[in-house]
Image: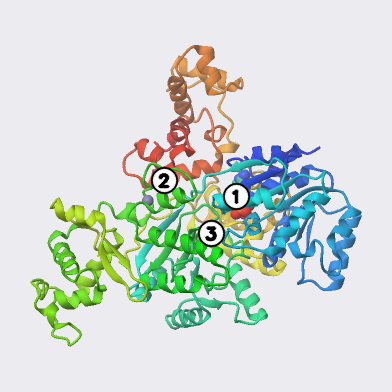
Amino acid sequence: MITPKEVLKNFYGYDSFRGQQEAIIQSILKQQDTIVLMPTGGGKSVCYQIPAMVNDGLTLVISPLIALMKDQVDALNGMGIPAAYLNSSQSASEQRFVSEEIRSGKLKLLYVAPERLFGGAFPLTETLKTSRLSLVAIDEAHCVSQWGHDFRPDYLMIGRLRQELPDVPFVALTATADKQTRADIADKLGLRKPKWFISSFDRPNITYRIVPKRNSFEKLLDFLEYHQKNSGIIYCLSRKNVEDMAGRLQAAGLSALPYHAGLDRQTRASHQEKFIKDKVKIMVATIAFGMGIDKSNVRFVVHMNMPQNIEGYYQETGRAGRDGLPSDALLFYSYADVMTLQRMIDTPDNPDYSEVMLAKLEKMKQFCQSNTCRRRYLLGYFDEEEQKDCGNCDRCLSKDNKQDMTVPAQMLLSTIVRLKENYGLGYCVLVLRGSKSAKVQEEHKALTVYGIGKEKSEDFWKKLGQHLQQEGYLAEAGTQFPTLKLTTIAWEKLKGKKKFLLQMGEGGFDHQPTTVAYEEGLFEELKRIRFGLAQKENVPPYVIFSDNTLVEMAQYLPHDHDSFLQISGVGQRKAENYEDHFLPVIKSYAAEHLLKPKKKLSARKPSKSASTGLSKTELVTLQYQRDGLNVFEIAKAREMSLTTIEGHIAKLVKLKKLEAETFLSKDDLLNIRLFYRRQEGSFLKPIKEHFGERYSYFQIKVAIAEEQ
Ligand code: ADP
Ligand code: ZN
């Protein structure tokens, strides 16, 4: 029998499991019903695909994402895993062919939409009676809950399937679920004493930004300029907005296409395909788009309008950076959008549902208006306590870049108070600047604040108003016309005569560059080769290799079969199929640029000879370590403190006597190192604070040992 680890290495080309993957797989293999909550990009698929390979028989995968099935199946077949799908997009003869394959027992994984379970021309439950099922996996499991944001009534039928298949374990997976939805998943699916695996929902590689929706198009162009070479999604509220935006971007010379439900099926499919295959960079879409795509190198997600709830926001922004490389989420916020959504949601036909959704909307508004770290707020929403600010959102990044705006802030705030908090920003500014406009009521012309702000432009005051709002000193209220009110913290500041320090330079999207050192020119060439292969095979490029895998090739410059296999994401099948396409290019690039292949850490055997730079006691630790003891056991055996042993290990890693990957997965290493390289100085504490409980000090020390 093949082990999970062997499947991971031989088929996927990965060296180690990530996070809780291994434990989840073990739980499934023990026939336990299992529930997996893991953020997008966390690696959920592996959790059921590997048991599918280890077990005899067929694994049934229920997914609402018909558009995604073909790509998922192509990806599996590309790795040498026999998989197929059944859905309404196939012809009767295609469906019959798949049913035959199921009967023949050749398949390991079968993807189906929930409505196919009991309905359709070939009710699946009939076909399945003749085959041996080893596992049922339910993807996007939150769809079963009507308290979730994405309810699919067909999912309720899965409960019946659970009853009909008493001997088969079920695993439910989702990337988003609040408390109510979580409870519903276990309940509505009828899972039996499920074992829960809840991963952190943090996506450390995504930088969250929320900016006021003023001059939004110019701000957007700025942002896209920074992302010139990258793929991304821009979400708009309506079909019309989508069309307009796509048109404006095209007029500005950008590679963009629209996507919304009003386009005919063929156009939609062709636009989506162009995006997935990197033929067009920007997809302008309604939120209908993205559910069905699994493109790992989406570098940015923009919301031109505020989403209805945090689940939606989290899920949509989560489509950025699935490959773990630094990515951006940008949202344009306006109170007018809040009111539009309120009207949309507040329907009399289902008052309970409206109430839940309105409460979710309120949270979303608070999130946009709050002046705390975005990530902390998000994680808090998903019940993860995060004590520290993240250092990688607009709030955190702007903290050190503030100006003293005390005097003008006091002027604006007192105008608002004199106007009894009954007006919007535009009107307050008219009064403040002493406008002669007929719009200004006579009684307001008599106020002491009338005209005190003449010296500064209208633009300045509006910007200031928005900043005060963004930082939580002003809140908008009112249902028809937004009016401005001072918040408690604004009153406290005024009373305490404290300074208003505001970050006024908005809109800049300056970044630290991606810091993995690789040959960019080669990377571009490898992408071209991948593109050609993808076209020939009619699959998305990531099905051939992910960006991450190409980055590693451009970093380590593999020169033969063995070193090619060392690259993360290169399994047996892919090495055989593709090495003749990639290796010659890498070799000639290396020759031309006088570069030598670099050894991958995992390929490097620890050197046998004791060498300089190590003390005796460190060598003893090394010996124990090689004998297979972990740090705790070594500390115990040597009657030394854990910190001391950890110090030895870090030094051993630094001097390349041990591999960092013994202690952390490659992804975790990359994560920590990326963050470390962005820092000034070599302090551990900010790193620890950034990642919180995710990594121990020891793991961080090991990860950065070689960098110091
Ligand atoms: P999710 O379904 O949770 O969004 P995926 O299953 O699509 O995530 O995985 C995201 C990416 O991470 C994929 O490219 C996948 O191949 C990769 N991946 C998954 N597990 C590992 C692992 N153990 N090591 C390296 N990469 C992994
Ligand atoms: Zn932050």
The residue most toward the bottom is: 438
Q: Earlier in the sequence, mark 3 or mark 2?
A: 3
Kind of residue indicated by mark 2:
Phe
Residue 648, percent from left and from top: 45, 23
Q: Which mark is residue 315?
A: 3
Residue 62 against residue 691 in the figure, above or below: below
Dot 2 falls on a residue whose secondary structure is: helix
The quadrant in which residue 583 appears is bottom right
Question: Residue 360 location in percent, x, y?
Answer: 48, 60
Q: Mark 3, residues whose alpha carbon is within 10 Å: few (<14), some, or many (≥20)?
A: some
At 19% from the left and 58% from the top, the residue drawn is 403
Q: Which mark is residue 182?
A: 1
Quadrant for residue 89, please give it. Answer: bottom right
Say which amino acid is labelled 1. Arg
Using the image as rendered, state which of residue 348 and residue 119 is in the foreground: 348
Classify mark 2 as within 8 Å of ligand 2 or not, answering yes or no: no
Q: Which residue occupies 82% across, 66% down?
A: 119
Give the answer, above or below, for where 198 lies relative to 586.
above
Height in image: 355 above or below 243?
above
Which numbered dot is residue 675?
Answer: 2
Of badges 3 and 2, nearer the viewer stands 3
Separation of marks 3 and 1 at Cα, in angstroms: 16 Å
